[in-house]
Structures are given as structure tokens and as C-alpha cells.
Amino acid sequence: MSYEPKSVADAAALLRAGKLCAFPTETVYGLGADATDADAVLSIYETKGRPRFNPLIIHCADLDMASMLADFSPLAARLTSFWPGSLTLVLPAKSGNGLADVATAGLDTVAIRIPDHPIALALIAAVGRPLAAPSANPSGRLSPTTAEQVRRGFAGKVPVLDGGPCRAGVESTIVRVEGERLVQLRAGAVAREEIERRLGVTVEVAEKDAAVAAPGMLASHYAPNAQMRLNAVPRDGEAYLAFGAAPQFGGLMRNLSPSGDLHEAARNLFSMLHELDAARVGVIAVAPIPETGLGEAINDRLQRAAAPRG
Ligand code: TXA
Ligand code: MG
């Protein structure tokens, strides 16, 4: 049985120390981590057994915190009238916002919300940093609406700050703001009609194929300019993304983890891809990555980055 936080202060101490802690929101329980701490965020993927780096919703305590992370267009600013509340906004990320790359899966957008729950708000404020939090269930299972469901789902291995049952019981509505266009990526606790009515705007619905469950498929997803060759040995003129003991290579190279540690590799993945791509090479050769543990997520992400572009 894991240590049970008895208060917001207990839970904040865990999160500040880079640990996970589940906490209540008005929608469902979230599995929280300090969104600026790459290792902590990676533990979310490991703990949930999430097979790929799906970007996470970043939970903020107030508008000041949110405005450090993303650019709010005038339309986005009007949508914040739903905060605190069950509306998640996908906005252009501010560069240098301090969020771990793995929290946003390397995208140049960020999904943000201010939850409408006194415990969640007090917790984020006590941590003093935004919290990344997917629903607190093992991947593929139902979202939990009580602390007991969270404990059962993770066999007692995840600390849970108990705040009683969640009010909404369904996840937040996710809307992407693209200039003057609003696109609903996931239906949720705030009805689309309610957004349209209150703001006098139209909210489009994303095509089924653009399902938010697979944002890696979205055209907006980060894909390097370079071609990618996977499971490869580098050739002259290519850049090389190595893993573990690497062959001699005279060209531009980064090593995801010289010691072959998948957690370290996952932590480095997006930033190293960005670095190699910034050098404007034609091809990035990538070493084989084992398909175990976080390797599954790393390989999924690499395959998406390597997929033919439409
Ligand atoms: O109610 C909720 O939203 C709960 C509570 C804990 O806040 N959280 C939640 O998180 O449902 P999660 O991880 O289960 O769902 C987040 C969804 C994912 O499907 C992800 O693809 C999408 O948000 N998402 C996150 N960032 C995105 C982005 N930049 N662009 C598009 N989709 C994004
Ligand atoms: Mg979920």
C-alpha cells in the first residue's frame, strides 16, 4: 500500500518531490505530476501503461499560471469565462514555458484547463507549478470518479488525495482554438451548444479520424522536416539518433541513453529530435529501440514521425 496523503500539503509535498499523486477534479480523478518535471511526467505514462506519448492536459490554478504557458487570442480569452470548469483549451504554446516536452508530446500546442474543484485548485497552488494529469486509470480502463476506484485500479500503488466522488463524472470537453475557428476534439462535461450559446460562436466538430485519442495522427502533430530511417545504422551525411552503445560516427549525433536506459531515452526523445532537426539534415537515422516498457511509446512516436506525410 502506498503512502496516503492526508492533506493538500501532504499531496503537494509528494508532487514537489517529483512523485505522482492522484487528486480529485470536478470531472474525474487525475493522475498528477509536476508538468515541468520530465521524469515525473514519464512516470505517468509508465504507471498508466500508456502505449504512446499522448499529450496531457495541463492543470492550472489560475489565469496567471495559464497565461505563462500559452498564447491567448481574444477568442481564447473569452472562452476562459468557462474557467474554473470542465473546458480544456488547446492553444499555441509559449516558447520557453518550462513544460516538459513529454507532457505536450513535443507539440507546439498545449491543452490547458483550470479545474472547478477546491481541492484541485488548492493543490496546484500549493505545488506552485502546473500539473499534468490524465485520468487516473490504467490505460484502456474506465476513468475513476472516486478515490477507491483509483486505489483499486492501481492495486494501491498510487497515492490518492481523497476528495469524495467527482461531480461531473465525465472528462472535460476539449476545444482547439485556431484563430477565429473553434474545433471540438473531444465531447465532454461542457456541452458544445452551451459554448456556442454563451459566446455566440460556432464550434466545429473534429472529424472522427482526428479523434483526440490519437492526436499523433493529427496533421498538427510535430513531424521533423528531415526524413527518418528507423532501426538504422547511420550513413555519411545523415544525423544519428543513437541508443545504448553506439557505433563510431563522425557526423551530427545525439544518444538517447548511452547506458541503454529507456526512461532516460524517453526523457530525451523530443528534445533530441528537435535538436537534430534544427540542423536541417536530410535524414535522421535512428538506432533500434527495444520494444519493452517505455520502448513501446518511444517506438510508436518514432514510427509516427517517420510515417509518409500526406
Ligand atoms: O476531465 C479531464 O479532462 C481529465 C481530468 C483529470 O482533468 N483529464 C483527462 O486527461 O481526461 P486525458 O489524458 O485522459 O485526456 C487528455 C486528452 C488526450 O486525449 C490528448 O490526446 C488530448 O487531451 N490532448 C492533450 N494535449 C493536446 C494537444 N496539444 N492537442 C490535441 N489534443 C491534446
Ligand atoms: Mg483518459
Image (spheres, grey):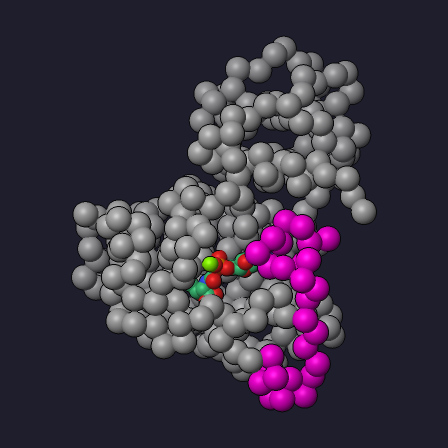
Q: Residue drawn 18% across and 61% down? A: 6
Judge left or right: residue 206 versus residue 143: right
Q: Quadrant of residue 293?
A: top left
Q: Residue drawn 33% across and 50% down? A: 20
Residue 293 in view (yes/no):
yes
Residue 51 versus residue 242: which sits nearer the camera?
Answer: 51
Residue 21 lies, with reference to residue 183, above or below; the image says above
Q: Is residue 212 magenta?
A: yes
Q: Residue drawn 36% across and 63% down? A: 144
Residue 302 lies, with reference to residue 149, above or below; the image says above
Please identify the residue farthest to the top as the structure is shown: 248
Place of residue 269 in the rendered image (x, y in percent of width and height, measured from the top left): 56, 36
Q: Residue drawn 47% across and 36% down? A: 294
Q: Which residues are magenta?
A: 192-219
Q: Is residue 270 magenta?
A: no
Judge left or right: residue 204 versus residue 61: right
Place of residue 285 in the rendered image (x, y in percent of width and height, measured from the top left): 69, 25
Place of residue 31 in the rendered image (x, y in percent of width and height, measured from the top left): 37, 56
Q: Quadrant of residue 149?
A: bottom left
Judge left or right: residue 290 versus residue 283: left
